[in-house]
Image (spheres, helix red, strand yellow):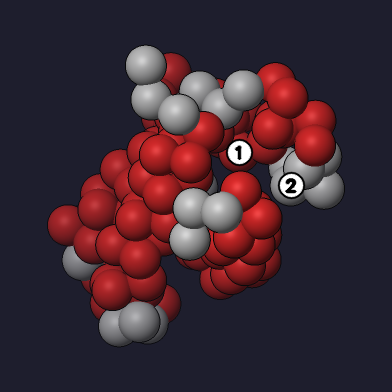
């Protein structure tokens, strides 16, 4: 079984993967299906990793919207027809940067950075 620190590192790795292509901008995201799929896939990884974190860690760091992260993963996987590319881009721009900072801080506090 993977530890919380490993799951948190999975989240950071997925954010880094998204950042590589998000840096090309919204126009590239809007025009290139492969970038869209890449980003959505890595958002799924983030949600899956978050869903596997211990309840203790999620409670300890309740300022992170773990439930929303997991809920978005469930929508992407099970109700993919409801996924708005504008929402995906908004998540990348507005939600991933603070998530990255939070996860880096959590790993540092756990002594795993």
Residue at (41%, 49%) from the top-left corner? Answer: 9
Mark 2 or mark 1: name the one nearer the start of the chain.
2
The tag on residue 64 is 2
**Is the residue marked by circle 1 packed among few (<14), some (14-19), or many (20+) residues within 10 Å?**
many
The residue at which mark 1 appears reads as 69
Residue 18 spot, x, y in % from top left: 35, 63
Q: Nearer the viewer, mark 2 or mark 1?
A: 2
Say left or right for 52 vs 31.
right
> Eyeballing the image, is 61 above or below 108?
above
Residue 45 spot, x, y in % from top left: 37, 38
Can residue 93 be seen here? The reply is yes
Residue at (35%, 65%) from the top-left corner? Answer: 16
Badge 2 vs badge 1, beta-carbon distance below 8 Å: yes
Can residue 90 be seen here? The reply is no
Q: Secondary structure at mark 2?
A: loop
Toward the front, the furthest residue is 111
Real-space Cα distance between discs 2 and 1?
Answer: 9 Å
């Amino acid at each position: 079984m993977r530890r919380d620190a490993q799951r948190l590192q999975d989240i950071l790795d997925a954010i880094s993967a998204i950042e590589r292509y998000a840096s090309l901008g919204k126009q590239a995201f809007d025009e290139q299906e492969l970038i869209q799929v890449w980003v959505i896939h890595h958002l799924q990884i983030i949600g899956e990793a978050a869903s596997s974190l211990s309840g203790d860690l999620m409670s300890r760091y309740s300022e992170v919207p773990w439930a929303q992260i997991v809920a978005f993963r469930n929508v992407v996987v099970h109700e993919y027809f409801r996924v708005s590319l504008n929402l995906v881009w908004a998540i990348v721009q507005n939600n991933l940067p603070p998530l990255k900072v939070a996860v880096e801080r959590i790993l540092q506090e756990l002594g795993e950075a």
